[in-house]
């Protein structure tokens, strides 16, 4: 087999896998509809406001409910204590001009 | 058409043979290139999946939450505020919410204790999130002992475990009765953590929030829209931060690729000279080099993207977990919902494949237009 044919086959295989990944995202996304619906019902029933992704501090557990200056601990230039604090942005509420 | 295709196939054959003559160098380039695409695509897919999941799940969070702020800090709000706010057009229901944090020194984790409004939990019983159950090894019927605000240890019987499927929102939750909550934290009757207002018409939310701030100046309303925007911003920010952290690696790659693609080695110059001397046209040399760039960048893009897809959606972004976890003991076990944004994929393709392919063509064009004798010298 010529190198170009082998390469075409290789790229064809990868492109098929890419198409399959899109199909997989569509199918699994559709299948997860029930799971999302259940989570949404739980959010509604328990009146939750945030994802339980970062549970180490108040302002990372519930970023939307945090005190205005809690993320800065003592003063606005204080060094961040928690690792995820440095990855979090102040809530939208704080960045809205008042 | 057939002739054109055959011509391109011949050029591709020649390019592939030429690449195969320097296997170490080109495979190394492919590996580094693929790794950069993998990192960028992983961050992109992961944050996009989380952002979309947050948007879908939190779409049912309370319309308005009213917090009392004392000296710049969130304070408990008296039940009397429900009457003080008066009748506001558009508000169909209002009630107090009880929730709080508890630090458990035994596992060095923060729990979120919450009193559910639509569910009765018997005194002395709790419902725990899957994260807590896993960390403390709890199951139905077990007892969890926690030290309350008055220093006394209180034991709660686990009545139920929240389903693991919803860990993303409930991993660290402990649901308990109102009486237990008040006794545990020492919160007197008539005080709530915050108030929840239900507004039927979403277009009235801003107006209701304005009225609330006027009537209760020591409070701040948090709208559902702001909750959703916060999550959009958090993941956008997070993606941005990772891209900034990756900037050094990307720049190093750009310099490496630019040097590899644009700085022709003496051997390559000689190759071009020979090709021209044996009758190749300038356009053929450029086409051949275009194929060289395309072979490497297209392969790196496809391999990098596919590896990123498998990493994010089949291993739950295992490589990112240590960064995301931070100090969180109760990190939820969840598998991001697969989602591929066509526009983002196209952007990634454009910014990874095109620059390299173009970078290979420009210097070749310069070398290929010069006299073969001069190039070979």
Image (spheres, coloured by chain):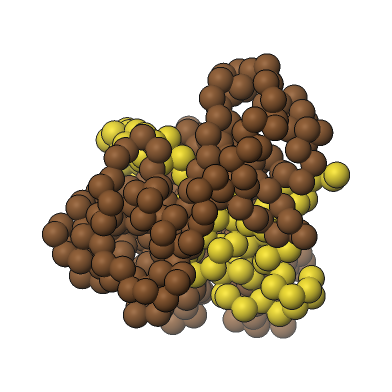
Chain colours: A yellow, B brown
Residue B25: image x %, image y %? 49, 80
Q: Nearer the viewer, residue B263 or A34?
A: A34
Report the residue at 78% width, 74% height from top: A75
Q: Is residue B158 visible?
A: yes
In this picture, is B209 found above or below B185?
A: above
Please tell me whether residue B278 is drawn above or below residue A49 in the rendered image: below
Identify the residue shown where x is 79% and y is 41%.
B217
- The image shows a total of numbered marks equal to 0
Note whether B29 is above or below A6 in the view shown. Answer: below
Residue B235 image point, x, y percent? 58, 53
Query: Front-most of B371 and B298?
Result: B298
In front of the other: A5 or B243:
B243
Task: Please tell me whether residue A37 is drawn above or below residue B36 in the rendered image.
Answer: above
Image position of B91 (left or right of B164): right
B121 on left or right of A69: left
Left or right: A26 as drawn, with respect to A74: left
Quarter of the figure with the C terminus of chain B: bottom right
* Coordinates of residue B239 in the picture (x, y in percent): 59, 58
- Where residue B206 sits in the image (x, y, percent)? 72, 28
């Amino acid at each position: 087999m010529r190198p170009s044919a082998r390469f075409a086959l290789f790229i064809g295989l990868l492109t098929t896998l890419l198409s399959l990944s899109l199909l997989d995202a569509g199918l699994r996304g559709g299948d997860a509809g029930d799971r999302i619906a259940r989570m949404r019902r739980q959010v509604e029933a328990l009146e939750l406001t945030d994802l339980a992704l970062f549970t180490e501090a108040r302002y990372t557990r519930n970023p939307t409910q945090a005190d205005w200056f809690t993320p800065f601990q003592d003063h606005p230039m204080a060094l961040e204590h928690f690792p995820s604090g440095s990855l979090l942005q102040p809530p939208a509420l704080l960045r809205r001009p008042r | 058409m057939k002739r054109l295709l055959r011509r391109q196939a011949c050029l591709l054959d020649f390019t592939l043979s030429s690449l195969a003559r320097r296997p170490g160098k080109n495979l190394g380039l492919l590996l580094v290139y693929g790794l950069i695409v993998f990192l960028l695509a992983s961050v992109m897919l992961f944050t996009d999946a989380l952002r979309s999941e947050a948007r879908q799940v939190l779409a049912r969070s309370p319309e308005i939450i009213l917090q009392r702020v004392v000296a710049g800090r969130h304070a408990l709000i008296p039940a009397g505020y429900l009457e003080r706010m008066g009748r506001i057009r558009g508000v169909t229901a209002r009630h107090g919410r009880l929730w709080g944090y508890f630090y458990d020194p035994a596992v060095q984790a923060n729990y979120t204790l919450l009193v559910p409004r639509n569910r009765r939990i018997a005194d002395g019983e709790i419902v725990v999130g899957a994260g807590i159950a896993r960390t403390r090894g709890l199951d139905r019927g077990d007892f969890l002992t926690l030290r309350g605000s008055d220093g006394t240890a209180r034991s709660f019987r686990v009545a139920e475990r929240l389903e693991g499927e919803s860990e993303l929102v409930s991993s660290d939750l402990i649901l308990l009765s109102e009486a237990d909550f008040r006794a545990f934290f020492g919160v007197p009757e008539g005080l709530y953590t915050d108030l929840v207002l239900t507004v039927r018409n979403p277009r009235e939310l801003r107006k209701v929030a304005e009225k609330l701030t006027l009537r209760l100046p020591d409070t701040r309303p948090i709208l559902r829209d702001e909750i959703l925007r916060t999550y959009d911003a958090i993941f956008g920010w997070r993606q941005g931060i990772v891209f900034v952290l990756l900037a050094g690696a990307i720049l190093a790659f750009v310099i490496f690729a630019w040097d590899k693609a644009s700085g022709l080695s003496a051997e390559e110059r000689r190759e071009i000279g020979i090709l021209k001397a044996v009758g190749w046209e300038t356009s053929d040399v450029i086409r051949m080099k275009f194929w060289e760039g395309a072979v490497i960048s297209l392969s790196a893009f496809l391999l990098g993207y596919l590896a990123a897809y498998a990493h994010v959606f089949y291993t739950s972004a295992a490589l990112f977990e240590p960064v995301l976890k931070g100090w969180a003991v109760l990190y939820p076990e969840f598998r991001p919902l697969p989602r591929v944004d066509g526009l983002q994929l196209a952007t990634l393709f454009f910014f990874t494949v095109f620059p390299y392919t173009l970078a290979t063509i420009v210097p070749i064009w310069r070398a290929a237009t010069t006299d073969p004798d001069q190039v070979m010298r």
